[in-house]
Amino acid sequence: MLKSCTIKGRCLGFLLLICLFCGMMTGDPWKAIAGGPSSENSVNCDMQQGPCTKHLGDIILTLDILPKPVMAMKDLTFTLTVSGKNLSSEPFIDLGMPGMDMGPNRVELRRVKDTVYEGQGVIVRCPSGRKTWKATVTLPQTGKVEFVFDVIY
Amino acid sequence: MLSTDPLYLAFFITGLTVGFGHCIGMCGPIVVSLSLNSKESHLVFRHLLYNAGRVITYGILGGLAGTLGSFTILASSILSLQKGVLIFAGTLILLMGLAMGGWLPFGNFLGSGGSSSVFSKWFQRFSAAKSSVCFLLLGLLLGLLPCGPVYTALIASARAGMNAQTTPEAWVSGMGLMLAFGIGTVAPLLLVGKLAGLGLMKSRPLIYKISSVLMVLVGVYFIIQGIRY
C-alpha cells in the first residue's frame, strides 16, 4: 500500500485523518504525534479539599479557589496568599490545560489584605472530558508557580 | 471601543495559534469528513461557506456574551443546545462514514448517490440543489459545538462587554472579539480541508475504506461525548 503512495502525498490525507483521530482523543494533534502529557503536568494539588501551598524560593504561595467543589463553567473566586515578600505589582493567574492550548484565560488579582490577593475567573469545560487544569501564578519580576489540579464537570 | 483595538489583533492571533493546535484536533475530523464527501472543484468554496457560518455564529455568541456581561449565564443558557449539536455532528460524521464505506444504501451523504431508493433520491436532491448553502447552514450550526478555546474567547468577550458604556457598544465589543478569534481559526481549518480533499483518499479503495471506519469511530466518539456532556 505504501508503495502506491506517490508524490503529492497520496497518503497525506489518510495520515492526516489518523493524526486528527489521535489528536481528537488527546485534544491536540501535535501532542498526539509527539507523545502524551509529561510528568511535570501531573496533578500536584487537591484543590477540592482546600487551599494548596507551593514555594518559590523563600516565598510561600497559597492558592484557594471557591466555592467548593471547584467546578468548570462556574464563576470562581481565586484567592492567593503570598508570604515572605512584599510585591511591588499585583500578581495574576493564567488558567490552562496541561498539554492543550485553550487560549488566554487570565485572572487579574487585586490586593484585599496585606498579603492576600483575590480575583474572579472561570475554568472552562473541555469536551474531550479531560478535567486536569493548571493555574500558573505569576509574581511580576519574581517568578512563576504552577498549581495542577482536577476540576469537576 | 478604540481602546480595545489591540485586543482584536490579539484574538485574531489567538484564533490562528489555537486553530493550528486545538481546533485541528477537535474540529478537524468534521472538516475532513466534509472534504471526503465533496467534489474537489467545489471544495474551497464550500469550506469557505462552512467557516463563514461558523464565524457568524461565534460573532453572535460574542455579541450575546458582551451584552450579558457574563460568560456563565450565556454558557448555561446554551448548554442543552450545544449537547444536541455535538450529538448531531457525531451522527452526521457517522452517517457520512457509513455512506462513504458503502454500508448505507444511499451513497455519499453530500455527494452522488447510486441507488434509486427513497433515501438516495432525497440525498441526491439535497446534494444537487443547495449543498453549498447547506455548508453555510452547517457552519452556523456547528459553530455552537462546545469548544474550550471558544469558551475562553467568550470569557474575554463578556469582560469587554462589562467595560463598555452602552449596550450596543457591549454587543459590538463582544462580537468584534469573537469575529476576530473566529477569522483567525479559518486558515488552519481551510488548510486541513484542502489537504484532505486532494483526492488522495478517494483514489485508493483500501485507504478510502479505512478512512470510512475512522469516520465512523469519530462519529461514535462525538455522540458518546454529546450524551455525556
Image (tube, coloured by chain):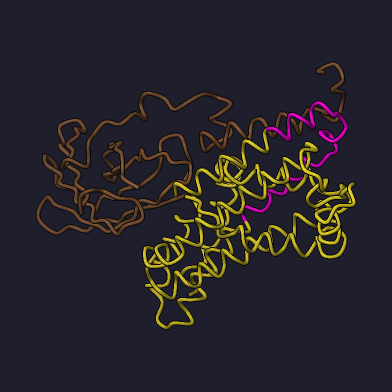
Does residue B1 sit above or below A39 in this rendering? Answer: below
Q: Residue at x 78, y 40 (%)?
A: B100
Q: Position of residue B131 (x, y in %)?
A: 80, 60
Is B185 part of what is drawn in magenta? yes
Total numbered labels placed on residues in the image: 0
Does residue A126 sit above or below B130 in this rendering? Answer: above
State whether residue B188 appears in this view.
no
State whether residue A27 appears in this view.
yes
The residues colored magenta run B184-213
Chain brown in the figure, letter: A
Chain yellow in the figure, letter: B
Q: Position of residue B12 (x, y in %)?
A: 57, 56
Q: Residue at x 86, y 64 (%)?
A: B129
Kindly indicate the quadrant of the structure image that contains residue B46.
bottom right
Placement of the N terminus of chain A among the 4 image quadrants = top right
Q: Position of residue B50 (x, y in %)?
A: 71, 58
Which one is nearer the viewer's eye here, B170 or B76?
B76
Is B106 part of what is drawn in magenta? no
Magenta portion: prevailing SS class? helix
Q: Is residue B179 left or right of residue B134?
A: left
Query: For the view shown, which residue lies furthest in the top direction?
Result: A3
Q: Position of residue A56 (x, y in %)?
A: 21, 33
Does residue A133 sit above or below B70 in this rendering? Answer: above
Q: Is residue B90 left or right of residue B125?
A: left
Q: Residue at x 48, y 58 (%)?
A: B153
